[in-house]
Image (cartoon, rainbow, N blue to C red):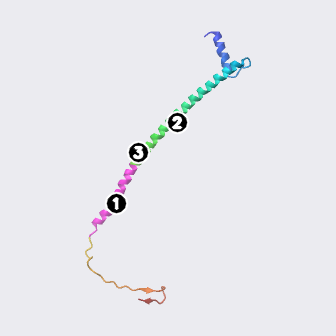
Amino acid sequence: MSKKKIEVLEASKQKLLGEKLESCSLEELHELEGTIEQSLRSIRGRKASRLLNISYHLLREKISQLKEKESSLVKENALLHEQYKQLLELPSAASKEVAPCTNLDRHTEVETELRIGFPGRETHGM
């Protein structure tokens, strides 16, 4: 690189940094403003792109975690469903083991007495 080119680049750098602007014409200041605005748009675009990329990766990670949790819950649900089915089968198995009652056809007479009133006081029998 030639010495002249290096001096031009150095002067341009200083202007972009806001140094030695007194010697700039109005046209140079407008050009500098346009260059700075274009640079800002480019920087903001890259920043937005990085943020989108980070958000995308975070969402993918969260989706993966949720899929693992879903799988775990499906397995747990299946286990609980099996336990529930086994609990439903227990009473029916127990009722099958009970011997049938043979005294169902016999009638038994029972005598009862009805008393009206408060306890400890004389009551009227019916």
Look at mark 1 in the image and give the residue it sits on.
88
Between 82 and 15, the one lying in front of the other is: 15
Which residue lies at the image location 34% right of the left edge and 60% below the top edge? 88
Question: At numbered mark 3, what does the secondary structure look like: helix, strand or loop?
Answer: helix
Mark number displayed over residue 72: none
In the rendered image, the vertical position of residue 54 relative to residue 120, given as above or below: above
Which quadrant does the C terminus fall into?
A: bottom left
Instruction: Pinpoint residue 115: horizontal percent, then vertical percent.
Output: 43, 86
Q: Residue at x 27, y 73 (%)?
A: 101
Three-letter code, disc 2:
Ser
- The first of marks 3 and 2 along the sequence is 2
Question: Magenta region, mostly helix, strand or loop?
Answer: helix
Residue 77 in percent (x, y) is at 39, 51
Three-letter amino acid code at the position of disc 1: Leu
State the CA–CA distance, disc 1 to disc 2.
48 Å
Residue designated by label 2: 55
Tags 3 and 2 in contact by the CB under 8 Å rule? no
> In the rendered image of this protein, does residue 21 appear above or below residue 62?
above
From the image, tell me which residue sits under label 3: 71
Q: Could you tell me which secondary element the residue under label 1 belongs to?
A: helix
Of the two numbered discs 3 and 1 on the same chain, state the one appearing first in sequence. 3
Question: Depth-wise, is mark 1 or mark 2 nearer the camera?
Answer: 2
Distance (Cα) linking label 3 and label 2:
24 Å
In magenta stretch: residue 86: yes
Residue 8 screen position, x and y as percent: 66, 14
**Amino acid type of the residue tagged 3 in the rendering:** Ser
**Residue 60, relative to residue 114: is it above or below?**
above
Would you call the spot at circle 2 few (<14 residues within 10 Å), some (14-19), or many (20 or more)? few
Q: In this view, does 42 lie to the left or right of 18?
A: left
Residue at position x 34%, y 57% in the image = 85
Which residue corresponds to the image point at 50% horizontal and 37% vertical from the top-left?
A: 58
Q: Give the range drawn in magenta.
A: 75-99
